Image (tube, rainbow, N blue to C red):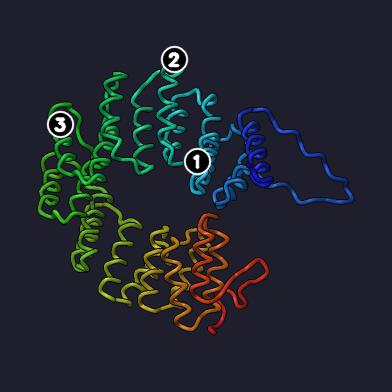
Amino acid sequence: MLTSARLRRGLSLSRLLRLLSTTSTPTPTPTPPESKPTPPPPTKTTTRAHLRRVTDPDRALSLLSSLSSSVSSYKFSVGYVARCFSLSSRFDDAAKLLDSRIPHSTAESDFAFLLASYGRASIPDRGLSAFKARIADGSLTVSVLSFNALLSAFLRSGQFQQVPHLFTNLSEEYHISPNDVSYSILIKSLCLSRKVEDALVMLKLMREEKGINPTIAIYGIILNSLYKINKFEEAELLWNEMVERTGCKPDDAAYNARICYHATRGETDKVLELIKEMETAGVKPTTITYNFLLICHFKNEHWEDVKKVYEQVFLMKVCKPNAATFRILLEGFSRGRDFERGLEVFRSSLNKNKVPDFATVSMFVEGLVKDGKADRAKAVVEQVRKRFPVYLTDKWKKVEKDLGFSLDANETASDGIGGGSQ
């Protein structure tokens, strides 16, 4: 039996989905009396920006309903809200939302994006059903675009072992000729399934039998996998083949695959040598490149070098830090017990809306408590509980209990993140 709260939520969802399935203009809000002026309503731009900071799926759906389906970013917003539902394990609601957009995705490019969104919401099977249904009713002229979107949906959702089967069966059943993008998705799925040898066979097949020249992206995928499983010699041979035989110019992703291998082994000199080689070749090091350099310095406990990279690359805006940057820095400073710099990094991650994952932040909080900074630990938890998805609430409550404090609805941290230690 549904509780009243769940019933209200269901009614609200159904009502909002009806709103989202129509293109009619919402009834304008009456103008308030002049004697009681109200602030101007948020613009569509601010609504979309706010939407991407919301983790509660019902709140996200409510914001989505205020957007016009004609704006260019609407389909991205639909995919984001569907993912919010899936992260809260409300997969049926995610499916209802995406299914409601099928009648409006008349252009194949829009339908392909919708198929990819099923993957982001971790319900690719629903996307497969939609794909087959559109073909069966004649509303979709199948091309490699939708085929690739469907394959990527399974890849993105972690069901990469399904991709080879779908690749073969769907291409044969619907007479689709896979292109280089199709093969890159297939090869990546094989690599993720730890079937790198099969990926190498497929690389040879597409080149010699299908007449499709492998792109640098495809080489990069296989190189990354070979380095990760410590097949250094095979990777270097493939690198040489890529450069000398095919003439493919290595890009940042290919270089980063090599750099990652040496960084995880703490080989600082080799990492710096490869970064210099990148620059000489006209390839600009990326945020990922410098993330690997940070990992290398942390592995060797070169704290001053870490600070130099942080200050000279990220604070000087040579590269913009991403979520992984903040995770690496926060974890590294926690292990090095440099909590002041860790707090600085955490504050920056809040400002940029790139807070590290639960495991990293909880380790940082535990370190603060052990270092006698319980007030700051409580302030950190207070902030992340506002930003992390609701499904992590119970995990944070357990962290609070284990560390001997609790933040209920009436309690807030006393000194803020920048306050003094206890």
- Give the quarter of the image for residue 101: top right
Placement of the N terminus among the 4 image quadrants: top right
- Callout 3, which amino acid? Leu
The residue under the point 68% across, 42% down is 8
Give percent across and percent down for residue 328.
Answer: 37, 65
Judge whether 304 appears above or below 269 on screen: below
In the picture of the structure, the residue carrying the numbered disc 1 is 91
- Callout 2 crowding tier (Cα within 10 Å): few <14, some 14–19, many ≥20: few
In the picture of the structure, the residue carrying the numbered disc 3 is 205
Foreground: 12 or 414? 12
- In this rendering, position of residue 70 left or right of residue 155: right
Residue 166 visible in the picture: yes
Q: Using the numbered discs, state the Cα–Cα distance from disc 1 to disc 3 in whole angstroms.
A: 38 Å
- Give the quarter of the image for residue 306: bottom left
Placement of the C terminus among the 4 image quadrants: bottom right
Sequence-earlier tag: 2 or 3: 2
Sequence-earlier tag: 1 or 2: 1
Give percent across and percent down for residue 15.
Answer: 67, 35
Sequence-earlier tag: 1 or 3: 1
Q: Using the numbered discs, state the Cα–Cα distance from disc 2 to disc 3 in whole angstroms.
A: 33 Å
Judge whether 384 appears above or below 390 on screen: below
In what element is the residue under mark 2?
Answer: loop
